[in-house]
Amino acid sequence: MKRYTTYKNSGIDWIREIPEHWEVRKLGNLLSPISIKNHPDLPLLSITREEGIILRDVDDNTSNHNYIPDDLSNYKMIRKGQFGMNKMKAWQGSYGVSEYDGIVSPAYFIFKFSDKVDTSFFHIAIRSSLYVSFFGSASDGVRIGQWDLNRDRMKSIPFIFPPLSEQVAIAEFLDEKTGKIDEAIRIKEREIELLKERRQILIQEVVTGKKVWNPATGTWTPPERTKDSGIDWIGEIPEDWEVRKVKHILRFTNGLTITKANLQERGVKCISYGEIHSKYGFELDPEIHPLKCVSEEYLKTNPNSLLEKGNFVFADTSEDLEGSGNFTYLKTEEKVFAGYHTIIGRPIDQFEPRIIAYIFDSNKFRNQIRKKMKGVKVYSITQSILKNLLVWIPTKDEQNNMVSYLDEICKKIDDLIALKEEEIEKLKEYKTVLIDAAVTGKMKVMKNEGVKE
């Protein structure tokens, strides 16, 4: 990677040197605020951290929780090539140059460029990791996630300004290179989805009895004898399996009736609905889960909310339908409370909790929950719903074989997924380094020549 011939001190600690012929400008000299309203017929836009300015899907109630008023005449107009910013989330990078003519919230800042600049270069540069922290230091507030950008301090944010021809060259170079990186990331993300689908198919084959362990051949094969489960969507099951309602295998109680304010750093560990998700699998291991605690006084006043080894904990609230029915079970003897928005399921019979967990995690079981869930932005599950779900139970002799097999194949797939995720993170890191180096002059990019080697 070749550098420019001569450099000078930029006067900015985090940038240090820049090419001799580049400038350091203030955003206040590059941007002029504008506020034009009364264009309610233009498309409604959103300003996001992930993608900058995008067309807003007004029919999708799940993608944006902000209320859309009937009267949009007060919304601000932004033209293609102008710079827009969510001033409450600028510290997160929620800003960018618009590719559309449209309208945005009246609370947002809109700017036109007061000097000639390549808008593609400006968009890429200002959204790079190097600049985002400046908007944090120019924002005020105590409410998490809602820091108000101070416009006067924003005007003083420095911006590295190459000659226009180099801006164009850098933008074209980065557009090509980051496009290839993004495509590589998309391919790996798709590979992860296919691995997850494969994992689910393998689990479903075993937990629904489509394949059973055949000791004579030492393989998993279709069962020799089956019976009608009596339930259309379950279909045939192995002859010695049975179908029960969940209320006949688990006894339910609620978790602690507390709020986040009751949580503390010391005491008895406590798992609330927010910690029940796929990141940690369906085993609750207090040594792995980063759990908060509650006072030991709860041991005296709320013993029914204390978990025992093998107890299940369901999240009674989910922000998306796919997450409905999220659960975990305690795999250790450690004292752990079930916290707010949770439902405890205590086994009535002796069975291997991990095979029940595999069944609970299968699409066939979760689909029961999804069909019964109610909600728009938040989905809730009740004890009544859980009690009346159907579950198919293998014999006790089969349960250990099923767990061993599923654990083995899931580990192989999970290891592959972890490898793909690591590769994605490395690609993202490379993309960040590439952008930062190009927009600050640490690498030399010339028009139609890419990076000079």
Image: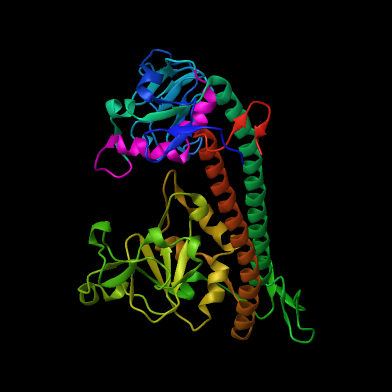
Up-down: is 232 above or below 160?
below
Q: At 33% across and 25% down in the image, what residue appears?
A: 155
Residue 436 in the image, given as x and y percentages of width and height: 51, 39
Residue 140 inside the magenta-drawn segment? yes
User: Which part of the image, by quadrant, shows the N terminus?
Assistant: top right
In this view, the residue in front, 72 or 192, is 192
- The scheme the figure's colours follow is rainbow
Q: Residue at x 29, y 34 (%)?
A: 148
Q: How many numbered circles are shown?
A: 0
Query: What's drawn in magenta, residue-wise?
Result: 117-145
- Camera sees residue 50: yes
Q: Residue sitting at 33 percent across and 78 percent down?
A: 335
Above or below, comparing residue 435 to residue 358 in the picture: above
Give yes or no for residue 38 being in the magenta stretch.
no
Q: Nearer the viewer, residue 18 or 139?
A: 18
Identify the residue at horizontal 32%, vertical 27% (top origin): 156
Quadrant of the rendered image containing residue 47: top left
